[in-house]
Amino acid sequence: MLTRIDHIGIACHDLDATAAFYRATYGFEVLHTEVNEEQGVREAMLRINGTDDGGASYIQLLEPVSADSPVGKWLARHGEGVHHIAFGTDDVDRDAEAVRGKGVRVLYDEPRRGSMGSRITFLHPKDCHGVLTEIVTAAPPGTAGEGSGH
Ligand code: V0V
Ligand code: CO
């Protein structure tokens, strides 16, 4: 079951400058940064609030590592802005299959590695009224994932 907004992904040209804006303007601090080569991004997670399913909601800042990555292509076409939304669940495998069964294209056969040791998959934006939609299961508490990778 999808139980929270896990994050909003925001495409930006300069991760450090954008993180500085979020800190100066709202007081949001970067909890975690990492490079995800497979996804073609350097990303930062800004924790906004805890949620009643035991998880949390974040802003995810995304800087492309190459022009031909998904975020690089998006930036060239649209400029900076909201790139995707991510719903959190305790079982991404089950929920991705359920969505697939409703005729929505799920981009990966198996979930892949996301931020902080999470497991992620994406739904095609053309099947979701123009919104690139991610489904994510956070790493279990106490594992290497959360908060590491600074
Ligand atoms: C592309 N399109 C989008 C979109 N990206 N629409 C809404 N939101 C987006 N973010 C539209 C685009 O405007 C085109 O529509 C059409 O899809 C094809 O676009 P394209 O530029 O030719 O791109 P494709 O087809 O090569 O790739 C699009 C997909 C790609 C969605 C398949 O971006 C992808 O695989 N995304 C999933 C991976 C990802 O985004 N990783 C970065 C975040 P028109 O103009 O033809 O109508 S990594 C992350 O979130 C992590 C690590 C995490 O959360 O932990
Ligand atoms: Co994301």
Image: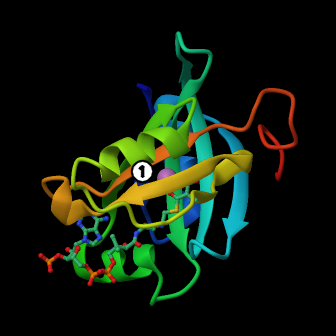
Residue at image location 30% in from the left, 58% down from the top: 132
| Apparent side of residue 34 relative to residue 12 in the rendered image (left or right) | right
Tell me the quarter of the picture where residue 66 sits.
Answer: bottom right
Residue 106 picture location, percent across and down: 37, 60
In which quadrant is the N terminus drawn? top left
Q: Nearer the viewer, residue 84 or 112?
A: 112
Relative to 74, say whether 86 is above or below. above
Tell me the quarter of the picture where residue 148 sits.
Answer: top right
According to the picture, the residue beneath numbered tag 1 turns out to be 134
The crowding category of the residue bearing disc 1, from other C-alpha atoms within 10 Å (few below 14, some 14 to 19, many at least 20), is many
Q: Is mark 1 within 8 Å of ligand 2?
A: yes
| Apparent side of residue 77 relative to residue 28 in the rendered image (left or right) | left
Residue at image location 67% in from the left, 76% down from the top: 37
Q: Is residue 8 visible?
A: no
| Count of marks placed on residues | 1
Residue 88 picture location, percent across and down: 49, 33
Q: Amino acid at mark 1?
A: Glu
Q: Nearer the viewer, residue 111 or 38?
A: 111
Relative to 108, say whether 10 is above or below. above
Q: Residue furthest left?
A: 129
Relative to 76, say whether 58 is above or below. above
